[in-house]
Amino acid sequence: MPLFMDVHTIEGGVTAAAVAEAHKADLQTQGKYGVDYLRYWVDEANGQIFCLVDAPDAETASAVHREAHGLVADAVHPVVEGT
């Protein structure tokens, strides 16, 4: 399946703990969509979250976020893993 990196911007900042809870919700929801949320990164001060996801397409990846917690990404980029 293709890989995607999605980017969220949360006005006012975000905590790593809050993102961890949202990621747990993604993991609980992803199976029914055939998606695998692999990793995420958080920039607390700037309110940015970056999620790496293995998904059939960007729309399906977004559907998991929408159902799990409602925090849909501002952008979803197809990516290729490098070494």
Image (spheres, rainbow, N blue to C red):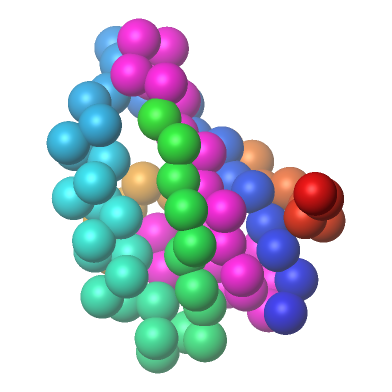
Q: Is residue 21 above or below residue 42?
A: below
Q: Is residue 2 left or right of residue 16?
A: right
- Answer yes or no: is residue 39 visible: yes
Q: Is residue 65 left or right of residue 5?
A: left
Pinpoint residue 36: horizontal percent, then vertical percent.
50, 73
Pinpoint residue 47: horizontal percent, then vertical percent.
38, 20
In the rendered structure, which segment of residues is drawn in magenta?
43-65
What residue do we see at 70% from left, 63% from top?
A: 3
What residue do we see at 23% from left, 61% from top?
A: 24
Q: Is residue 74 above or below residue 70?
A: above
Quarter of the figure with the N terminus: bottom right
* The image quarter in which residue 17 lies: top left
The number of numbered badges drawn on the structure is: 0
Task: Decide whether residue 63 is among the magenta residues.
Answer: yes
Q: Is residue 18 left or right of residue 10?
A: left
Task: Decide whether residue 71 is among the magenta residues.
Answer: no
Q: Residue furthest front?
A: 83
Q: Is residue 10 left or right of residue 5?
A: left
* The image quarter in which residue 55 lies: bottom right
Pinpoint residue 52: horizontal percent, then vertical percent.
57, 53
Pinpoint residue 58: horizontal percent, then vertical percent.
66, 63
What residue do we see at 75% from left, 71% from top?
A: 2
- Answer yes or no: is residue 11 visible: no
Q: Is residue 77 above or below residue 31?
A: above
